Amino acid sequence: METTIAAVTVFNNRARVTRQGRAQLEPGTHTLSISELPLRLIHDSVRVSGEGAGVTLLGVDVRKEEYTDVPEADIAQLRREHDDLVYSIKALEDEATALDARMTWLRSLAEFSGEQYARWLARGRAVLDEATNLGDYIVEQTGLINERLRAIEREKRDLEKAREALERRLQRVERPRTHTRNVIDIQLEAQQAA
């Protein structure tokens, strides 16, 4: 049964909390439960009253109830973060693959052009400045590619560490946690619909 707090009276060492709720009853015996009550609830202090034509209060029981809690919203957010990290790692791997292919092309260009320029220089069909410019380009590009590959390794290592930490956190959060709470069961008998 859904209830709301209607009044609170604070004393030196405790408080009295008055709750109110409504229920529709068909003829017969019913048990209405008020759950999610604090563990500090003093069982002997529970009082129940109500109004309704032909309704008799049969009894009141206070009991402890265990329940499990799995924070679905937290799990969903952590899974999204995990997927983002996996995507970022894959993007870095793809970039490294493309840079490796470019490095292979530069090596081939250096080998081919070295032989070709030597022949062209010997025949007078090329000038040394062209060969030097191409060599400088290959060296510059090789340096930039190696620098980026090292940066990718650092970024990937950091992302892998973050992914592993997130997976450990996700495992902890996904484990159901058991909690205890008090529940008040109110037994009623209705002679007619109320």
Image: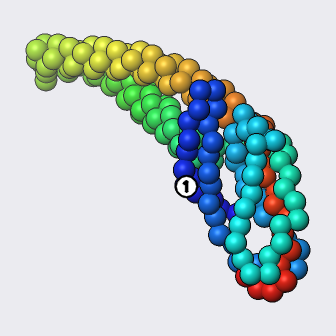
> Which quarter of the rendering shows the N terminus?
bottom right
Of residues 37 and 143, the one drawn nearer to the viewer in this rendering: 37
Q: Taking 69 as reference, is 143 left or right? A: left
Of 105 and 13, the residue lying toward us: 13
Image point 34% across, 24% down: which residue? 106
Q: Name the residue under label 1.
A: 6
Q: What residue type is labelled 1?
A: Ala
Question: Pointer 1: residues within 10 angstroms few (<14), some, or many (20+)?
Answer: few
Residue at 63% across, 26% down: 13
Residue sitting at x 15%, y 17% = 133
Q: Residue at x 24, y 15 (%)?
A: 140
Task: Tell how many labels.
Answer: 1
Position of residue 63 measured from the top left corner of the image (x, y, whole percent) = 85, 46
Left or right: residue 106 versus residue 44 is left
Question: In what element is the residue under mark 1?
Answer: strand
Colour scheme employed for the rendering of this structure = rainbow
- Name the one closer to the observer, 76 or 107: 76
99 is higher (above) or lower (below) than 70: above
Residue 127 vs 9, above or below: the answer is above
The reply to whether residue 18 is visible in this rendering is yes
Q: Give the x, y percent position of residue 149.
A: 41, 20
Viewport quadrant of the C terminus: bottom right
Q: Position of residue 152 (x, y in %)?
A: 42, 22
- Residue 114 is at least partly visible in this image: no
Image quadrant assignment for residue 117: top left
Quarter location, residue 174: top right
Q: How far from the left and from the top, in percent, is residue 75?
A: 61, 42
Above or below, 143 relative to 34: above
